[in-house]
Image (cartoon, rainbow, N blue to C red):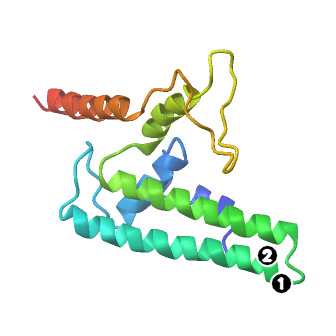
Amino acid sequence: MNSFADVKDNSIFAGCDNVFDEIRTLNKVWGNELPPIPVLRPNPIFAMTQFDHILSEEMNEFREISLKWQGTDGYSDLDMLTDLSDWFGDMIVYLVGEAAKYGIRIEDVVGIIDDSNASKMGPNGEVYRNPTTLKVEKGPNFFRPEPAINAYLADLRKNHETHLV
């Protein structure tokens, strides 16, 4: 069995700067079309339905992890953390790969969303939480991420067209 180091050394990932690039590279090797700019996929409803099916399967796996923890003697904290780590990693791989199929560099979009999330805090750094769900709520300085995401995607398309001329 190959170790992770063996796979990395003898790798299609040579030249990749980060894990996001590695996921995109692997998707290319698998034959997935990865456009250089943000575009809708051919037959987007079908593509989204397929992806929904994958995410549903992954959510079922998450529920199975939870049930295993509730009902199995001998399932240690480390076992639980291992299963959760694998699940979290799978979700990231699926999401990054799917975004790449639309020409979206999701790490850039996540940065924009992080900025928006940081704007939920109050003027003195206070955090507003829903008392029932403990979800962080929007504070008075909140700004929605969608306008910045839209501008980012439009800029990528514009810059790509400029380079083609």
**Is 49 above or below relative to 134?**
below
Foreground residue, 133 or 72? 133
| Residue at the outermost top position | 124
* Vertical side of 129 occupied by 47: above or below: below
**Which residue is label 1 attached to?**
72
Most distant residue in the bottom direction = 72
> Viewer-proximal residue, 158 or 28?
158
Q: In x, y percent, where is residue 72?
A: 83, 84
* 2 horizontally vs 68: left or right: left
Q: Nearer the viewer, residue 137 or 155?
A: 137
Which mark is drawn over residue 30?
A: none
Dot 1 amino acid type: Thr
- Residue 53, horizontal then vertical, whole percent: 41, 74
Residue at figure coordinates x 38%, y 67% from the top left: 51
Image quarter in which the N terminus is found: bottom right
Q: Is residue 102 visible?
A: yes
Using a 10 Å C-alpha cutoff, classify the residue at mark 1 as few (fewer than 14 neighbours), some (14 to 19) or many (20 or more): few
Question: Along the horizontal axis of the image, is 108 left or right of 114?
Answer: left
Q: Quadrant of residue 153?
A: top left
Viewer can see residue 11: no
The residue carrying mark 2 is 69
> Residue at image x 38%, y 58%?
98
- Label 1 SS: loop
Q: Measuring 62% from the left and 60% from the top, which residue is drawn there?
A: 88
Q: Residue at x 46, y 57 (%)?
A: 95
- Quadrant housing the C terminus: top left
